[in-house]
Image (tube, rainbow, N blue to C red):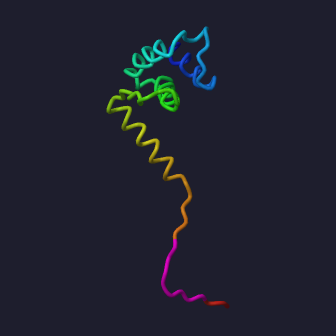
Amino acid sequence: MLTAKRIISYCKNSYFLTPYNYETFDDLLVEAKHIAKYGDIPSCRRAITMLNNDPKLDYNIEVVISKRVKKELQKKAQLKMNSIPKATIKTGKFVVYFD
């Protein structure tokens, strides 16, 4: 968790290396690859996702997520998509009566 928090603070600091976080970019990559194995933890997923947006990173780091957590995330995404209001267009002839 501490490593994930350090990576998140690096990302929030506009991707600048600071002495109290990491000395070199390679140290950051080593720790990022280490926590990528723990994709079931939301903080680790968030840290790796934020790190993948770094312009200095040549490749994306893949997060390892178990099947159970993948299903839960898909369900959450589906619920979120279902809650968005949608407009529907119906075509055809309609009769309106006024009393």
Residue 2 position in % (x across, y down): 53, 13
The residue at the point 55 percent across, 11 percent down is: 22
The residue at the point 51 percent across, 12 percent down is: 24
Is 21 situated left or right of 81 in this image?
Answer: right
Question: Which residue is farthest right?
Answer: 99
* Quadrant housing residue 66: top left
Residue 6 position in % (x across, y down): 56, 16
Choose between 50 and 88: the one closer to the eye.
50
Is 81 situated left or right of 66 in this image?
Answer: right
Question: Which residue is farthest left?
Answer: 67
Q: Quadrant of the C terminus?
A: bottom right
Give the extent of the magenta segment.
Answer: 89-96
Choose between 76 and 4: the one closer to the eye.
4
* Quadrant housing residue 65: top left
Q: Is residue 93 magenta?
A: yes
Main SS of the magenta segment?
Answer: loop
The relative height of residue 6 versus residue 46 in the rendered view (above or below) is above
